[in-house]
Image (tube, rainbow, N blue to C red):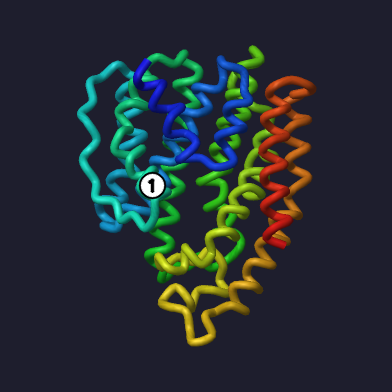
Amino acid sequence: APAERFVWGILPHAARSFAPCILALPARLALPAALGYLYCRVLDTYEDLVQDRVRRFEALALLPERLGAIRRGAHVEECPAQEYTCRDRRDEAHALLAREVGRLDQLFREMDEPVQEILLDLVRDMSEGMRWAGWVLDEQGGALKDAKQLRTYCEAVLGNPIRFAARLFSWGRGKGVVLPRGVETAAMDVGEFLQLANITRDIEKDLARGVSYHPKLAGDVRGLGADGGAMRILAARSVLVDRALSLSPAYLELVDGLKLKAGWLSASALLMLRFTERYYVSCA
């Protein structure tokens, strides 16, 4: 079907390490996993590439409202056109995905009811977290001020997707979509573990757009000094990587909690861990 062809065509350009991990899943889970990831990428695109603050917050709020309406069987209009500020070809691919979100909606309509439920929960929770982060960053001059705020941000943007994946895996094995408390906690720890890879990789790019996720760099969001901020960036990156690696045992807790054992689900989880390990080794 054209909508599904679009999903598999755009996925490698919208997802780096996640794309092969999704393709490793059993067919019944691969499409909803791809759909969930791409909806998250649409929210990321609104956050990163829509410069107008009012339009950005409206777009973030509208996506879960649309999915809720679709799930109720209501008619929805096309998403309002947005203006995206793209800096490179990757940004252009993300903007293309956001413009074509209606194709994702076609597939959402066809999902089983439990899958629609967890997709909607994912998009709603991530949208709320991103709007919170946007408000905090605006109020604090573009910088998060402490580890607690960083944790909340990581839970929003990647803890929720990991929780979604865990719920999808559970549903795929016939165990429903309600997770044990220990698995919920491990999913959020894994989300921070993985999101810190994105944050440490993109420190310079984020500073260029006026955002810092570490208080040591709060003064650099208004422009790097004559020294280029190299030593401050190094110090911040070191602290963030140390925090990430302290969370790595949660990955095993999540795998054990889901009782994945051998098979394609474990293969997907192992691929993600290997991609993440490779990144942190290069970062160190």
Based on the displayed image, in which of its 4 quarters is residue 52 positioned? bottom left
| 10 Å crowding of disc 1: few (<14), some (14-19), many (20+) | many
Residue 191 vertical position relative to residue 86 in the rendered view, above or below = above
Residue 233 in the image: x percent, y percent?
59, 73
Q: Examine the rendered structure and indicate whether residue 94 appears above or below residue 242.
A: above
Q: Is residue 63 above or below residue 156?
A: above
The image position of residue 215, as x and y in percent, is 56, 71
Q: Which residue is mark 1?
A: 45
Question: Toward the viewer: 129 or 272?
Answer: 272
Give the residue at the far bottom of this rendering. 226
Q: Which residue shows up at 74% across the image and 42% down it?
A: 250
Which residue occupies 67% across, 30% down?
268
Picture residue at 54% right of the left edge, 39% below the top: 160
Residue 1 location, x and y as percent? Answer: 37, 15
**Amino acid type, mark 1:** Thr
Q: Is residue 147 left or right of residue 135?
A: right
Q: Position of residue 210 (x, y in %)?
A: 41, 68
* Relative side of 169 to 130, left or right: right
Please count the marks in the image: 1
Helix, strand, or loop for circle 1?
helix
**Quarter placement of the C terminus:** bottom right
> In screen coordinates, is 254 left or right of 225?
right
Along the viewing direction, whichever of 35 and 257 lies nearer the viewer:
35
Residue at coordinates 37% horizontally, 58% vertically from top-left?
87
